[in-house]
C-alpha cells in the first residue's frame, strides 16, 4: 500500500484500507462523503434518502453530546469531514466561545437551502417511476413476448421429451 490514494481501495473489506481510502482521498471524492439523511417530509418530497450538506441548511443533531440541538450550518469543512452548526458551541476557560465540529453522519437535514443545481438530480430521481411500477411493466412485457413467441410451449415440449427418455432408459435396465 505504498500509493497515496487509489479508487479501487473502496472495495476492500479491511478497515485499515477503508480508513486510508477516506483519509487520503482528494477533495472531489471527499465531497461525496459529506452526505446527511433527510427528514421524512423531505424524503417524500424529493425521493432521495440523503443529500450533501451545504452552508445554510437547517439541521438537527441526532448523535453525540449535542444530541437534540438544531441550527443552521455555518461552515462545511471537507478536509476534516466536519460541519459547524450555529448554537453548537462550547465555552473556553478564557470566556470565549468555540464551535464544536460535528460529523455529517450524525445530523439530519430539516430544511434545505434552495439551489437550482442541487435539485436537478433529485428532481429527476423523484420523477422516475418506483421499483414496483417498473417490475409490473416488465412482467407485462415478458407475458406479451412469451405469448407471441411460444417459448413456454417449446420448454414444456423439451421437458416431456426428457421424461420420456428417462422412462425408456428405466425399462431397458433389468
Image (cartoon, rainbow, N blue to C red):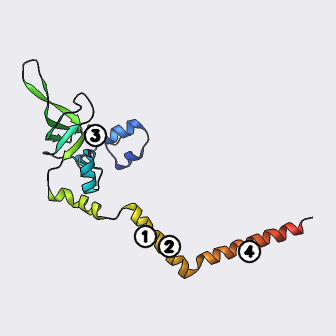
* Marks 1 and 2, the one that precedes in the sequence: 1
Q: Are circles 2 and 4 on residues that touch, CB within 8 Å?
A: no
In this rendered view, identify the residue nearer to me: 16 or 71: 71
Which label number is shown at residue 167? none
* Marks 3 and 4, the one that precedes in the sequence: 3
Which label number is shown at residue 137? 1
Residue that extends furthest to the left in the rendered view of this protein: 95
Q: Alpha-carbon distance for marks 3 and 1? A: 36 Å
Q: Alpha-carbon distance for marks 1 and 2? A: 9 Å
Q: Is residue 77 left or right of residue 139?
A: left
Q: Position of residue 63 (x, y in %)?
A: 27, 33
Q: Alpha-carbon distance for marks 3 and 4? A: 60 Å
Q: Alpha-carbon distance for marks 3 and 2? A: 42 Å
Few, some or many C-alpha atoms within 10 Å of disc 3 (few <14, some 14-19, many ≥20)? some
Q: Are circles 3 and 4 on residues that touch, CB within 8 Å?
A: no
Q: Are circles 3 and 1 on residues that touch, CB within 8 Å?
A: no
* Marks 3 and 2, the one that precedes in the sequence: 3
Q: Position of residue 28 (x, y in %)?
A: 23, 49
* Marks 2 and 4, the one that precedes in the sequence: 2
Which label number is shown at residue 105? 3
When asked about the image quadrant of residue 107, the answer is top left
In this figure, which residue is indicated by the disc labeled 2? 142
Which label number is shown at residue 161? 4
Amino acid at each position: 500500500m505504498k500509493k497515496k490514494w487509489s479508487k479501487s481501495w473502496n472495495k476492500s473489506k479491511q478497515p485499515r484500507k477503508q480508513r486510508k481510502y477516506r483519509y487520503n482521498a482528494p477533495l472531489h471524492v471527499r465531497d461525496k462523503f459529506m452526505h446527511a439523511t433527510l427528514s421524512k417530509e423531505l424524503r417524500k418530497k424529493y425521493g432521495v434518502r440523503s443529500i450533501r450538506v451545504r452552508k445554510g441548511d437547517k439541521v438537527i443533531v441526532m448523535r453525540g453530546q449535542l444530541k437534540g440541538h438544531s441550527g443552521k450550518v455555518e461552515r462545511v469543512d471537507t478536509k476534516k469531514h466536519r460541519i459547524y452548526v450555529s448554537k453548537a458551541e462550547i465555552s473556553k476557560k478564557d470566556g470565549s466561545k468555540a464551535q464544536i465540529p460535528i460529523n455529517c453522519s450524525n445530523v439530519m437535514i430539516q430544511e434545505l437551502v434552495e439551489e437550482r443545481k442541487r435539485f436537478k438530480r433529485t428532481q429527476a430521481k423523484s420523477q422516475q417511476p418506483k421499483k414496483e411500477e417498473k417490475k409490473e411493466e416488465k412482467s407485462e412485457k415478458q407475458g406479451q413476448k412469451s405469448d407471441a413467441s411460444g417459448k413456454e410451449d417449446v420448454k414444456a415440449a423439451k421437458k416431456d421429451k426428457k421424461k420420456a427418455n428417462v422412462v425408456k432408459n428405466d425399462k431397458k435396465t433389468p
